[in-house]
Image (cartoon, coloured by chain):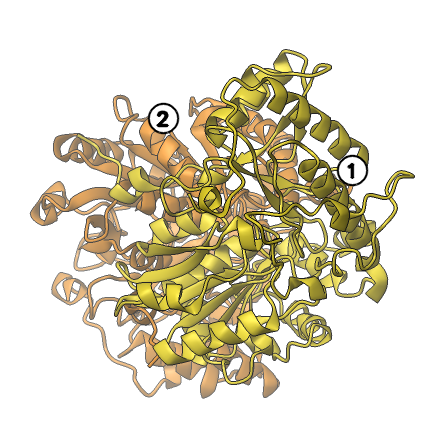
Chain colours: A yellow, B orange
Amino acid sequence: MLTISNRGKQMPPSPIRKLVPYAEAARKKGIKVYHLNIGQPDIETPPAILDAVSHAGIKVLEYSHSAGNESYRRKLVQYYKKAGIDVTYDQILITTGGSEAILFGFFTCLNPGDEVIIPEPFYANYNGFACAAGVNVVPITSRIETGFALPPIADFEKVITNKTKAIIICSPNNPTGYLYSLEEMEALKEICIRHNLYLFSDEAYREFCYPPVGGHSPTIGGHSPTIGGHSPTIGGHSPTIGGQGTGKHVSAMHLQGLDQHVVLMDTISKRYSACGARIGALVTKNKSVYDAAMKFAQARLSPPGLAQILGEAAIDLPDNYFDAPKAEYLRRRNLLVSRLNAMPGVFCPNPGGAFYAIARLPIDDSDKFCQWLLEDFSYNDQTVMLAPATGFYGTAGLGKNEVRLAYVLNLNAINAAMDCLEKALEVYPGKVKIEVTATAMAE
Amino acid sequence: MLTISNRGKQMPPSPIRKLVPYAEAARKKGIKVYHLNIGQPDIETPPAILDAVSHAGIKVLEYSHSAGNESYRRKLVQYYKKAGIDVTYDQILITTGGSEAILFGFFTCLNPGDEVIIPEPFYANYNGFACAAGVNVVPITSRIETGFALPPIADFEKVITNKTKAIIICSPNNPTGYLYSLEEMEALKEICIRHNLYLFSDEAYREFCYPPVGGHSPTIGGHSPTIGGHSPTIGGHSPTIGGQGTGKHVSAMHLQGLDQHVVLMDTISKRYSACGARIGALVTKNKSVYDAAMKFAQARLSPPGLAQILGEAAIDLPDNYFDAPKAEYLRRRNLLVSRLNAMPGVFCPNPGGAFYAIARLPIDDSDKFCQWLLEDFSYNDQTVMLAPATGFYGTAGLGKNEVRLAYVLNLNAINAAMDCLEKALEVYPGKVKIEVTATAMAE
């Protein structure tokens, strides 16, 4: 008998994409589906960077250097400098999306059977790469009551074993939107140094950090929702947003004395709304890690050539390029979060960055609910596709009444999607009354 | 202490690229280096397929389907049909270069510790992907005396264990240029069925198969080298070119009754001289393999978006597109092989496809020799970069007097490179007299 490998069997299907057939079926029935399930922004890719590819005058589309074009890496040095990150071009390895940076990090730093600690909920594909690399993910739980702040240091130390080799963080976070504060980053540094751990830092959303709630409350479509006004009280204490209220990104590379530990995992996917480019980077000052990662890079020859041109051109975008998308995401966040928190029984902490939010809904089972939204529900021939949060937790049973929403659609679409969700929650047969108490939240 | 993983340490550096610093140093000394060391063709990428990217009218460069754009996969069905391969679009998974198809094949079909048999010399990066996946490569030796024909079935059966899960072949072959005959492919089929093995078939060079020697002896630069005339006699018997003299490609997918066993690994890199595109495909009729590979594909989200447009446009190139590059490669092969075999003590079997040849040189150590060519030798301020064949053998000690040459440069450059090699062999301090007897050859 021909057999599939164990890792092939154990490999988790994408929790984000597994509902796709139901969405396709809904569309075939004539129902418009609002896709808040996937981090695919609708923001236009800057035409200038697409034009750069057209005007590159390519005669032969050759392999690039395995670490990526040197010209691109040298330009990225400037980009990182502006982000307060001081690296040289030979500390940057261009990868095929952030995905490959994660895979190379696992391959390079961890043996099969080694453990990586990840605060949950976390980007579901870390599971996939861990499975591919034979690495065990050890989740520690961050909680919706605290807006998904870093779990206490004690929670880390409880699960550290002699197999633990690394911690992965993502800030601003996918799927929670949480932005780690300097204090939280310093706490991580202490753990990494004390226990000799790598810090894998996924900073895909670096540019998208938002000012404190109420600080710059934007006007949306003529009515100005004050998030502060809707901020629900959970179990008697209003959710602490950690240090994320600063709107300032703290990179793992800002931390003094952690150079040998930090492996930065980066991507241009969200930064320039160029998800399909598949250009990322692994950045590290640890020369042994870089050199080993480089061997994996050599095996696959080179990162995508056309998209490297696009990535390089992006460095020349004017400094104010991010102002518009960031303002747009902020308006969307404010609308989304205020709409959610206005729904009975719904709670959504205010995310400090990225373009995701996790909301707790008064439902029995987020997987069932998200499928039901596509299969059995519509409102004015429209429905909404959400990602069940179960796929973002490593601990079985968590996330059953939470969903992730990506605010990657325009304000009108978000409003329409929220209308659908509001109506859906009124009629969903698996509706449950969530006791909003600290006990219920910790369930 | 922070440590590098075992696979990170064991990962082989690219044998093709490890001499790059010496080539850079030579260039800095003002020496022109002819690069016959790497399979990077100088053939122009068809402008029409680059234009297709420019004219795609992309607004948002989005993630594609994880298996690649459906429109592209549907077009590939037509491409494969013309190659006598009957597949449906949902049996095609677009990958990031052929590299990722190989990696997905390993991940999906083999457990860590499982074994894959590969006739050596073989594409060196199979080692890298095997190391990444924890898979053990078991080489069986094909020999230069037979032009690198498939080793006898007995050699396979000698090394098959209960850990053996797959055989990898590459036809036409990188690095030997050997083209497997129908008989050899049928022999492989028998082994795979008898022992329940996957057949991973790397068909990157499918289009580049050449007519029998002497069949269409092309005229080169005014003088017409007849390869037959230079065909050296080795140990008393002229080298058998297996069935490769037919000039016909036999795909693993042409074999009846092997559908569940075959995983085709494909790429557009060489086909359209688009190495930097990083677009390949994993093709299989085994639904379990496809579905499991798809999970690895989902984890990395999607293959490169811009280059998929290029790949799709390539299917619309006129049917005679391949005539010109194929004729050009054939002229180059004929020139290269005749120049090599005219050098004292040099033997190069005539490759039936791809654009590589392996030559045996009267040298002590191919690694030393290739480095010496770059560090210590020049002829009219020129030298040649070759790939030591040692990097293509799994068995230690083999390939020490063999080099791989990629005929990816034009005829003038090949002539100049051969002039350099000829002069180099006259003065190389590590020159040895190779006894051209069957015993010596089998050493």
Do we see residue B205 in this rendering? no
Q: Is residue A230 above or below residue A374?
A: below
| Image position of A402 (left or right of B100) | right
The image shows a total of numbered marks equal to 2
Which residue is denoted by mark 1 in the rendering?
A410
* Residue B441 in the image, given as x and y percentages of width and height: 18, 64
Which residue is painted at 38% across and 31% down in the image? B291
Name the kind of residue labelled 2 in the image.
Lys
Crowd band around label 1 with a 10 angstrom C-alpha radius: few (<14), some (14–19), many (20+): some
The foreground one among A430 and A404 is A430
The foreground one among B310 and B190 is B310
Closest to the camera, between mark 2 and mark 1, is 1
| Image position of B63 (left or right of B80) | right
Which residue is painted at 69% across and 16% down in the image? A379
Which residue is denoted by mark 2 in the rendering?
B285
In this view, which residue lies farthest toward the top? A29
Q: Which chain contains the residue that carries disc 2?
A: B
